[in-house]
Image: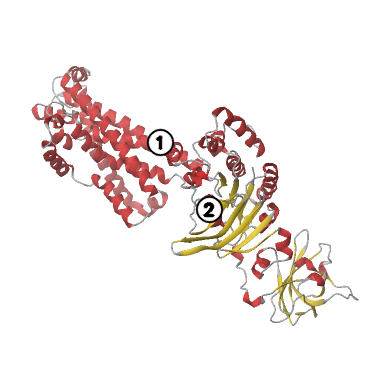
Amino acid sequence: MSTALSLEDVRVILGGNEILCGVSLDIQPGEFITLLGPSGSGKTTTLNVIAGLVDNSGGSVRFDGKSVDKRPSHDRDIGLVFQSYALFPHMTVGDNVAFPLRTRKVPKGDRGPIVKRMLELVQLPGMEKRKVASLSGGQQQRIALARALAPSPSVLLLDEPMAALDKQLRETMQIELKRIHEEVGVTTIAVTHDQTEAMTMSDRVAIMRDGLLEQIGTPEELYQKPATLFAARFLGEANLVPVTDGKLDGFGCEGAKRAGTAVLRPEDFAPADAGTSMPTITVKVITASYQGNRYRLDVDRGPGCEPMIVSLPPTTEPATIAPGAELRLALREPQKVHVVEEAAASEPPLVSSDIGVPV
Amino acid sequence: MNPELKLGLGYSKAAFWALGILLGLFLILPLLVIVPTSWNAGQLVEIPPHGFSLQWYEQAFENSQWTEAFWVSVRVAFFGSIIATVMGTAIALGMRRVVRGRGTRVAQSLFILPLAIPYVSYALGLYQLVNKLPSGLNDTLLPLILSESVIAMPLVYVVVAGALANVDPKLGRAASTMGARWPTILWRIDLPLVKIGIIAGFIFAFATIFDEATLALFLAPVTDITLAQQLYRSAAETVTPTLSAVSTMITLLAILVLGLGTLLSRRRVGATEGGEA
């Protein structure tokens, strides 16, 4: 029942602006893909094109190889969970979940058992008679999911599904969604601007930027081997260190490439032992903050360089990392340093408001 | 009065109170005169009334002139407001699907225009038109019903459009991703959500048409006159307490009907507020 989905050079022009500039994406049957990107990157538009709510002006969308460009959204056999859930306020929970069954002419007698099963799937059994307005945000979200899944659609689409939930509930729901996806096995495309959410839920993450696909890969690939500096900065914390003439600036060690930018993650560093053979760098602590599972250090590595972010184990002696203290850091695995063939200066810093702010 | 306004007014608020009370009296006084005279036990319209009796109510009910006129008014108001409700609702639903622009704003104003046109000129124009119709048509209530429905339509349109504004446009799109075509969306989503607005609109239309006199004067056939016309004719002859009794009953009916309408539109707001997360 799982459907393969492919986008082929999909373009969208709205009001004279090119919103999508040729997005191509192949999604395996049963795969969970997340489109991740800052606001305005075109991720929601991509979702709406798949749903048939926005027409593509070029390219094509295929379900199992068949183009659906000419099919209106009511003929696409999809389930879409809106950011605001869009539950029907005049219907009970049961009628909401049964709605897509009704439109698909599922016989009345068969609807009840399906609704019951769906409510069990989202762990809200026996809520059929409840009013939508009497539900909490988290419950509404589960009902919206049950409603989208009830007709066993070919494709499940999630538009910022967690944006309206508080942090703790969001984490619970991410795991929950993953469980449900594994149980149902439907091809799923989610949209989010929350990188943790993307990495938690998805088989693969597609990073989008300015209407284009920046990179697609498993969370591990994207984190360890970002293809571009944008991808490096967007997923996790990244220290971008220029590589010139094959040397990593400040470390004096060999880089994998002649020129480019090395992406050093905060956890790639460790306090250097006295006689270490690893490449080291001496930095000055700007601030150190204790975050439970680690110390997050902002360190200065010299004039003209951007400050770096370093993670140290929570057992570190606080006195050694007091602001102003000098610290010698070693690179844990210099041979694995990932270098992107882009100059660091070519990439403007991410605007912090792009991350973690619901749109 | 809101607290800020209260503070800001200071001593001049006495003037506001005086004006308010005066206006209130001006609106209520006629009722205070009419209602007591309707239960007068004597033969004349007099204040204060002599004794208490329901004889004038009895007379109004027994006189076929009054009962017939009442049913004419009911018929005109009922069919007129049905047509007005269908038109007003259809326009409100249609306008929502149209892309916003200057054209839609012009159209919106046009739909509300019947409220602004003087009824007399509208009636006069229609009168001449109806006179050209074959007698089989211009002798019926049809011209009156149609023209009343036109002036009541904006009321329905405004109320239903207001109700629709509270409906999340995403609901329709959500329904469409669930396999619903537009008739299903209309029938299962949009209409149920504005149902109470539609009923309220119908009630306002009914109340408006029921005692509308100008159009009736020009367009009602000679044989079927409305209650408003009948009242006017009787008053022109002699003023009897029957008139007071009839007016009192109409007023009560209007208060009842409009009260119901207001109650319903209140509930509508409460209902939709709770539903959206």
Task: Give the residue drawn at x 57%, y 27%.
Answer: A109
Residue A268 lies, in percent from the top left, at: 79, 68
Question: Tag 1's secondary structure?
Answer: helix
Residue B246 lies, in percent from the top left, at: 21, 25
Left or right of residue A21: residue A289: right
Left or right of residue B253: residue A248: right
Q: Chain of mark 2?
A: A
From mark 2 to mark 1, how far is it between C-alphas?
Answer: 30 Å
Q: Furthest residue to the right? A: A275
Residue A297 falls in image quadrant: bottom right
Residue A141 in sight in this render: yes
Identify the residue position indicated by label 1 in the image. B195
Residue A91 lies, in percent from the top left, at: 51, 35
- The quarter in which the N terminus of chain A is drawn is top right
Identify the residue position indicated by label 2 in the image. A48
Task: Give the residue drawn at x 74%, y 83%.
Answer: A245
> Compared to B201, does B233 lie above or below?
above
Residue A205 lies, in percent from the top left, at: 66, 58
Left or right of residue A4: residue A323: right
- The quarter in which the C terminus of chain A is drawn is bottom right
Question: Tag 2's secondary structure?
Answer: helix
Mark 2, mark 1: which one is toward the viewer?
A: 2
Q: Nearer the viewer, residue A248 or B184?
A: B184
Q: Nearer the viewer, residue A214 or B138?
A: A214
Q: Nearer the viewer, residue B271 or A278?
A: A278
Amino acid found under the numbered disc labelled 2: Asn
Q: Chain of mark 1?
A: B
Residues tagged 2 and 1 counted as in contact (Cβ below 8 A): no
**Other residues around mark 2 within 10 Å, as few (<14) / some (14–19) / many (≥20):** some
Amino acid found under the numbered disc labelled 1: Lys
